[in-house]
């Protein structure tokens, strides 16, 4: 399969990852001129000013709202089939998002994500609430590699910037409405409308809703597994009282009921969607996010920008922890999380020989583990067979950052950026550990300087070369006490990335490419192993020697009249440095020092093993062709294929314990008929009904979506 994938990726690269929810931002009806059109310019905004992706020294995949619609990307999971080097392992409301093998490998709230998502300029919840749907989107940017200047902490692997459509002053009463029906009794609706209130004020309202039966057939006395019920709404307000002042306010509300995430033991031989269980199942997120962005442009062209964010939500999860109807292990948690954030920027004009950006940032993030709601039961109901946790985990971070760009002779450009960050985390929790009460009041803090130095050369109007060194930083955290004292905190992760890239355009603007090679020095990888002195308990620490991760990435987009293609490919190799560890899933009393060992039946030397969640090969491939009919209507078939090679869920790479996640092969197809402002689409995702494991956690396997098909209709007005 890997050889076949390489051959396919060398020939043509993808378009049109078909989705399962209503269309996103509507694309305009095709015109006759579209037969010879050039590719639209891709704009990146992650560095706090708009720039052409093809002449910016950064590795990124940028998609407009229309491109998201074409590829059917409606949730974060689907990005792995459209972004080189990205892999997303979804085991419910916890989602491990990794880029180039770096992101999040431990399933707890103390270990932060290394791939942070921004929504309308605000960093979102770092780990939870990631199932928020993509709807009415203006653009999506996926940045690969550490983003140590502008994104700061939580961006050792990369970052995702999602921007929704703004209201349009003077734009009339415009928008769209879309509906969908499909198998599994799937019914979905989505829409948006622009409201031109005055010459200086406009509003936009958008919504997304879906109802679907469960994919799973669960036998046994389990409750839950009721399918999906999601509702989202967004209100946007735009006010421009003067040419210099712009005020943009958006607030989102999401109530996402996934019904539960049934799973069974990793080595089960039954069908992934045919399982037994006797524990309750539930999976619900609700949250609100409000963002206030204010821009003021001074007479000299300098922009003062303020971005204020408030987010508040609750995630509730209940699962059958043994994954069968024979055992009686259960898990429940209900966690509130509240984030306040404030960013201030000064942004110079970008047309002079020197341009710059300065910024200040502060964020407070508090998790509240509600009383009686975080329970691991063996079985539940007996204090001597339960693990119960409650309390708070507040985190704070502050930063100052800046970047300066110098335009040099011969079309060279030098960029220098840096960020100083201070981070703090603390636990104020109480635990009832199988009848033993434990309390923890502990704090940890860290600071760091990260950044980027790049040199780029615009060779001519069609070729752009760059080289840079960039660093990233992810704060450390605290271990939960396990009955014999408070374990030491684990330290921050640090990544140094060396990269060379070439971006080019060919055939009069009809074809563009991006290619890059990179090498990562990855220090202090945060991992859970057996407690070194007494390995019967799990314990979070840092690998004593750095890992190395290196690879090659390529992207291609092309349009030849009615034919369009695009693609992405990522090849990666990784190696862990010398590291001795005991697998926490196997109880032992033999000590194991992470730096020195010694090697024994339980103390393993993991040196040279692959980084977890670092598949060697990822790519997507596809094409679409638009047939124009005599009456001006068009019919567009689209075919796609996405591939993620094998990966390891832990550094221990124990096949018997289910650590190996097999490759993912997903074919999709759709047929769209456009007649004026009406688009009718037949779609199918996972056309071959590939049964693949989407994640492994706590000895359980979680299935990726099966084949889905249906009809989608969208009306633009």
Image (spheres, rainbow, N blue to C red):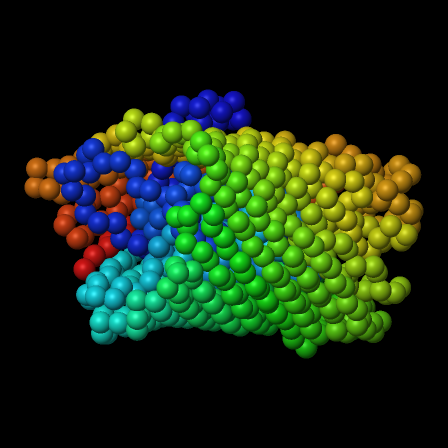
Q: In this view, does 81 lie to the left or right of 557?
A: right
Position of residue 250 measured from the top left corner of the image (x, y, whole percent): 40, 69
Residue drawn at (92%, 47%), measured in percent from left and top? 590
Q: Which of 361 and 14 is in front in this view?
A: 361
Say whether residue 516 is visible.
Answer: yes
Q: Nearer the viewer, residue 139 or 616?
A: 139
Quarter of the image for residue 623 reads: top left
Residue drawn at (39%, 43%), measured in percent from left and top? 52
- Note whether 139 is above or below 145 in the view shown: below
Quarter of the image for residue 374 reads: bottom right
Residue drawn at (68%, 62%), measured in percent from left and top? 422
Position of residue 203 measured from the top left corner of the image (x, y, whole percent): 29, 70
**Number of numbered discs visible in the structure rendering:** 0
- Note whether 709 is above or below 339 in the view shown: above
Q: Which of 179 and 177 is in front in this view?
A: 177
Say whether residue 694 is visible.
Answer: no
């Amino acid at each position: 399969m890997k050889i076949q994938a390489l051959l396919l990726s060398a020939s043509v690269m993808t378009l049109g990852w078909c989705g399962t929810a209503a269309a996103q931002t509507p694309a305009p009806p095709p015109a006759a001129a579209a037969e010879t059109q050039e590719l639209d310019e891709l704009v990146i905004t992650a560095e706090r000013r708009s720039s052409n992706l093809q002449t910016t020294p950064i590795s990124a995949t940028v998609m407009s709202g229309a491109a998201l619609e074409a590829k059917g990307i409606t949730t974060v999971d689907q990005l792995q089939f459209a972004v080189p080097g990205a892999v997303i392992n979804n085991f419910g409301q916890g989602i491990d998002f990794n880029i180039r093998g770096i992101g999040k490998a431990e399933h707890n709230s103390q270990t932060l994500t290394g791939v942070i998502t921004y929504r309308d300029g605000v960093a979102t919840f770092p780990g939870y609430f990631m199932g928020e749907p993509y709807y009415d989107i203006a653009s999506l940017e996926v940045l690969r590699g550490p983003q140590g200047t502008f994104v700061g902490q939580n961006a050792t692997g990369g970052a995702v910037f999602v921007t929704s459509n703004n209201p349009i002053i003077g734009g009339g009463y415009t928008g769209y409405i879309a509906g969908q029906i499909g198998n599994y009794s799937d019914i979905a609706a989505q829409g948006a409308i622009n409201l031109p209130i005055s010459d200086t004020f406009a509003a936009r309202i958008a919504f997304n809703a879906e109802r679907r039966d469960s994919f799973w057939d669960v036998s046994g006395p389990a409750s839950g597994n009721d399918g999906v019920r999601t509702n989202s709404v967004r209100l946007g307000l735009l006010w421009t009282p003067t040419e210099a002042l712009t005020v943009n306010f958006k607030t989102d509300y999401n109530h996402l009921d996934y019904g539960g995430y049934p799973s069974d033991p990793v080595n089960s031989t039954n069908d992934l969607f045919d399982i037994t269980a006797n524990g309750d199942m539930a999976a619900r997120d609700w949250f609100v996010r409000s963002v206030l962005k204010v821009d003021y442009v001074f007479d000299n062209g300098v922009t003062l920008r303020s971005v204020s964010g408030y987010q508040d939500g609750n995630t509730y999860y209940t699962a059958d922890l043994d994954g069968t109807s024979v055992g009686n292990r259960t898990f429940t948690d209900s966690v509130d999380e509240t984030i306040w954030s404030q960013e201030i920027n000064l942004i110079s004009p970008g047309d002079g020989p020197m341009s710059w950006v300065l910024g200040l940032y502060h964020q407070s993030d508090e998790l509240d583990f509600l009383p009686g709601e975080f329970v691991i039961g063996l079985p539940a109901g007996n204090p001597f067979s339960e693990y119960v946790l409650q309390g708070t985990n507040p985190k704070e971070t502050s930063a100052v950052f800046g970047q300066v760009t110098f335009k040099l002779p011969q079309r060279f450009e030098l960029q220098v950026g840096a960020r100083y960050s201070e981070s703090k985390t603390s636990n104020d929790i109480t635990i009832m550990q199988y009848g033993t009460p434990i309390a923890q009041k502990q704090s940890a803090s860290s600071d760091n300087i990260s950044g980027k130095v790049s040199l780029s050369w615009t060779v001519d109007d069609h070729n752009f070369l760059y080289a840079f060194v960039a660093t990233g930083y992810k704060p450390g955290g605290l271990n939960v006490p396990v009955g014999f004292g408070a374990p030491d905190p684990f330290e921050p992760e640090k990544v140094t990335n060396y990269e060379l890239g070439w971006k080019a355009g060919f055939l009069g603007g009809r074809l563009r490419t991006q290619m890059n090679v990179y090498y990562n020095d990855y220090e202090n990888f945060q991992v859970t192993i057996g407690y070194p002195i007494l390995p019967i308990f799990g314990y979070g620490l840092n690998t004593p020697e750095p890992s190395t991760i290196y690879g090659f990435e390529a992207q291609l987009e092309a349009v030849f009249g009615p034919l369009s293609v695009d693609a992405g490919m990522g090849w990666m190799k990784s190696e862990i440095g010398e590291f001795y560890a005991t697998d926490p899933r196997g109880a032992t009393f033999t000590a194991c020092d992470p730096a020195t060992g010694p090697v024994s039946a339980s103390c393993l030397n993991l040196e040279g093993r692959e980084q977890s969640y670092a598949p060697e090969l990822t790519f997507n491939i596809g094409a679409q062709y638009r047939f124009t009919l005599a009456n001006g209507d068009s019919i567009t078939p689209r075919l796609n294929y996405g591939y993620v090679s094998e990966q390891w869920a832990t550094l221990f790479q124990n096949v018997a314990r289910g650590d190996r996640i097999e490759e993912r092969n997903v074919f999709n197809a759709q047929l769209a008929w456009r007649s004026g402002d009406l688009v009718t689409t037949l779609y199918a995702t996972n056309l071959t009904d590939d049964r693949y494991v989407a994640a492994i956690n706590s000895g359980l396997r979680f299935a990726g979506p099966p084949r889905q098909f249906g009809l989608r209709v969208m009306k633009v007005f």
